[in-house]
Amino acid sequence: MIRKVILAFAFGAPENIRPNRLIAHQTTYLSLPRGADIFTQKDVPLDQLSTVFAENVTAKKDCLSTLDVVQAFVNWIMVLLAREGEIWDKCIIVAAPQHRLRCCRDLEKTLKEYKLAMEIIIDDELEAEDMYDKYSHQSWTRSWWQWWLREIPLRLLPWWLYKKIK
């Protein structure tokens, strides 16, 4: 049987801003017919029984980076692998379109570092223009300009340096 997990990334904070509600809605839509487990951040407003929150498996921080979420997810995988002897076959990433590439890159590289293999599927249903919210507590998710001023340097950093500044 093919087992799937959904890895949902918040886009800004807090949980009640529109982008995070859209991400939660899409995650719920994908999980219900598939019976998939969900791993996400507390800023994605989900309260399903099969949801595990990154904040519950990582050190306390005010704001989790993309890599923090990925590393918490991989740590959760390692615990499940040790306990159950198997992990999911597929991981579906739900994220804001402008965030997807980095989410996928961080997950691929981290899985490789842990010598884990899993098919990564990127859900592409969400639209980029719906994702900026002027009420976000994270200034870089309030507008297109603020996002890309921060995102481009992050994408250009070599992996070893990116991991250190996460």
Image (tube, rainbow, N blue to C red):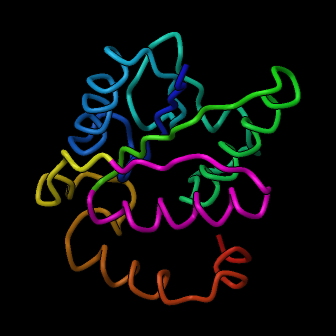
Q: Main secondary structure of the magenta part?
A: helix
Question: Quick check: 124 left or right of 137?
Answer: left
In the displayed structure image, the side of residue 116 where residue 108 appears, left or right: left
The residue at 61%/60% (across/down) is 67
- Asked which quadrant contains residue 141, the reply is bottom left
Residue 96 is situated, as x and y percent measured from the top left of the image, at: 29, 54
> 55 or 162: which is nearer to us?
162
Up/down of 106 relative to 21, above or below: below
Q: Residue at x 35, y 69 (%)?
A: 140
Q: Nearer the viewer, residue 84 or 99?
A: 84
Query: Which stretch did the figure color magenta?
Result: 97-122
Tell me the residue at 56%/53% (across/down).
Answer: 63
Q: Is residue 128 above or below residue 47?
A: below
Residue at the front extreme of this rendering? 1
Residue lying furthest top in this view? Answer: 49
Where does the image place residue 111, in percent across and percent down from the top left?
68, 56
User: Where does the N terminus fall, quadrant-wise?
Assistant: top right
In percent of width and height, residue 103 lies at 47, 60
